[in-house]
Image (spheres, grey):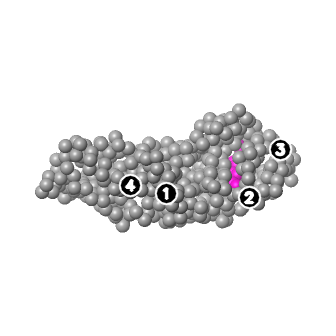
Amino acid sequence: MSVLLPAPGRTAEPELLAPPSPLQTLGWPSLRDGERCLPLQNAVDVALGPEKKAWSITILNEQGSVLAAVNGAAALIPASNQKLITTAYALDQLGPDFRLRTRLLQRSDGVLELEGEGDPDLGIAGLQRLAMAALGQGGSRREASGSIQLMLREEPPQRWWPRDWPQADRMEAYGAPVTRLALTSNALGMAVQNPAGRFQSLFTKEVQRQGGRVALKVVHPTQGSLEQQGVVDDLLVLHEEVSAPMHSLLSLSNTESHNFTAEVLLREASDQWDVTRASQRVQLWMQGQHLPTSGLRIADGSGLSRSNRVSSQTLAALLLRMHQHPLGPYYQASMAIAGRRGTLRNYFRGSSLDGKLWAKTGTLRGVRSVSGFLETSDGLRFVSLISNGSWAPNETIGTVLKAAQKFSRCSALT
């Protein structure tokens, strides 16, 4: 029996590896591609027509049988379907109740430090509470001017964006820089280009508004978080702001396709804020699940990078795997729903797919993808459809998904 492996360098919580439900009853079947559903395969072939080379499609049943596939092993650019990998990894590593924390700490010498984990919902109200906590304790070290000494711990600017994110994307809210101390996910209509400077300025103004003064310095630690440096015992937690729990963060990433949240989950789950190292850890985790990962290339957590590569076979197998995971219901619940919510709320409304497709969408120029859980009269189907260069991908996706429902009770096997 396979088990989900912890990331290198991180100790998994015991309850995640040995949950109350008996793991031995949750077998994870290997993919079987010996027999396909002939009517479904024919319908998929007809739907693609001369565009087969532009697609990677895989449809599995709950037993792991490949019912239909076209270029299933072809690794293409997945766009935001990349988030399916990130959120599966984060849920497995951190659990459904994990919360991101922004903490105000006091060192033994009285200097205050502010350290965050990239809470996407941290806003002005949270900043006001942190400023109040900084002013409200009397033992902090002050300069001769009477200003409180405060250090903001932040990642260096070269880590704020994955290297291959286009400059045009970095200017938009969906491509905002990924930092530990982020107000409103580092976006105000457009991306905030200097989030550390913005945080420093707003915090200083808030302290002044509350009648105090602060000597604030931004530092870029090179040795990771304070926990990684082993200095937590020398610090007193004065105040902390906490994010929504993991299951809500998963929904923000998958239902609304929030790039910033996905990138933070990648970094926190891997315990690495260097995106290259974080991506390497996820790649190792995927390989450790005995999934078909030929051609898999992980470059970021959100799918905005054009360097990501993944096949429909890999994603369909991951969906099957997560269906069997003890925390699988959280994973499926985090998806958009056709005709109902999230990025699928305006798609397939009133059709047979309405309310029956729980999936993650993905869109970049020339890229369209949909992967998720499809309810049929014969049980769940794990579907992944990725197109790179199709002329009318939305119509094709709808046709293929409806065919998967129509031929769910398949008697004609090849």
**Residue lying at the far left of the rendered structure:** 144
At 19% from the left and 43% from the top, the residue drawn is: 211
Q: Check disc 3 and report its element: helix, strand or loop.
A: loop
Residue hosting label 1? 170
Task: Give the secondary structure at mark 4.
Answer: helix
**Disc 3 residue type?**
Cys
CA gap, disc 3 to disc 1?
47 Å
- Gap between marks 1 and 2 measured at Cα: 28 Å
Image depth: mark 3 or mark 1 in front = 1
Residue that badge 4 annotates: 195
Q: Of callouts 1 and 4, which one flags the residue occurring earlier in the amino acid sequence?
A: 1
SS majority, magenta: strand
Circles 3 and 4: CB distance less than 8 Å? no
**Part of the protein shown in magenta:** 380-387
The answer to which of 46 and 40 lies nearer the viewer is 46
CB contact under 8 Å: marks 3 and 1? no
Residue 99, given in percent of the width and then of the height, sits at 42, 47
> Which mark, residue 410?
3
Name the side, left or right, on which 175 lies relative to 78. Answer: left
Sequence-earlier tag: 3 or 4: 4
Q: In front of the other: label 2 or label 3?
A: 2
Which corner quadrant of the image does residue 298 belong to?
Answer: bottom right
Tell which circle, 2 or 3, labels the residue nearer the N-terminal end. 2
Circle 1/circle 4 CB separation < 8 Å: no
Q: Give residue 376's quadrant in the image.
A: top right
- Of labels 3 and 1, earlier in sequence is 1
Q: Provide residue 262's location: percent of width, then percent of height.
A: 51, 52
Q: Residues within 10 Å of mark 3 (few under 14, many from 20)?
A: some
Identified at 85% across, 47% down, the residue is 39
Of marks 4 and 2, which one's residue comes earlier in the chain? 2
